[in-house]
Image (cartoon, rainbow, N blue to C red):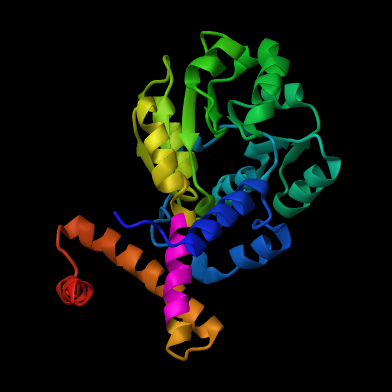
Amino acid sequence: MNRMPRRFERLAIEIATSLSSGRWLNRAWLNRTLNRTWLNHTWRPSTFPHVLQGKRIGFLGGGNMAEALLRGLVENGIATEQLGVSDPQEERLEELRDRYSIHGLSANIALVEWADIVILAVKPQVAMGVLAEVKDSAGSVALFISVAAGLTTQSIEVAIGDTAHVVRSMPNTPALVRAGATAISPGRLADADDLSTAKAIFDAVGITEVVKESQLDAVTGLSGSGPAYAFIVLDALSDAGVKMGLPRDTALRLAAQTLFGSAKMLMLLALRRRPPCGWISTLVALAS
């Protein structure tokens, strides 16, 4: 395989750094973007699964991924009184309360005592401390779902008690625009109902696949890191357009829509097991 051009390597590093630090996830920009109707992707369920009806869903941590899931659940018809979040920053809690009319709690223990389903949405480096804090109240929770990268179901079970039903997830950043790809894996005691519940939550922001926990590292490299690779392709396509005389913004929009349309077409055609007719001519062009 040919080595990636150095400038693309630098871009990939910058993208990864930006995504991990949240610099690309400016909330003002994000809220403007999410309100555009064209982002309501075709995989949105027409009727939301009944498995979530009446369940109180609490988020430990009110960051970008928690908000993406909150927005998806609300837009799919989950009552706001079923949703709650805890966060140490009162300003952030107030922001989420005002935007979604949900329960906002400054105490993690109070949230866990209130919720039927708890979603661990804090940074991995503080996750174990949060679990230790709520351990004594965790017995009343029917299901713990973790979005903390690298945290195994076993480590969560040890932290909160070996009777806990735990599902581990690996979402990706396009969940922020309701076009995410998430993989979920059951813990030792998690059953089919638990997986159905977790799947319903993540289906609110995209598609969800059930995999073995041992496969989540592969998922992290594929769909977790995949958006950064897509940005590299976008950069290359738009650069080519600029070299051929197109304005940068025009080239970028065309390239972005081309990737979006191609992915959508592939998913639709995959259901019919039929390749796009244009592939042959494209392969000939690449080989020439």
Quarter of the view holding residue 160: top right
x 32%, y 57%: residue: 2
Q: Does residue 279 appear to the left or right of 69 in the view shown?
A: left
Q: Does residue 150 appear to the left or right of 64 in the view shown?
A: left
Residue 283 placed where, x, y %?
A: 18, 71
Is 206 magenta? The answer is: no
x 73%, y 48%: residue: 101
Nearer to the camera, 72 or 128? 128
Residue 217 placed where, x, y %?
A: 41, 33
Residue 189 placed where, x, y %?
A: 42, 14
x 63%, y 42%: residue: 66
Quarter of the view holding residue 210: top left
The span picked out in magenta is 229-240
Quarter of the view holding residue 105: top right
Q: In this view, does 121 lie above or below 279?
A: above
Nearer to the camera, 158 or 82? 158
Quadrant in which the N terminus is drawn? bottom left
Residue 186 placed where, x, y %?
A: 41, 24
Q: Is residue 259 above or below residue 221?
A: below
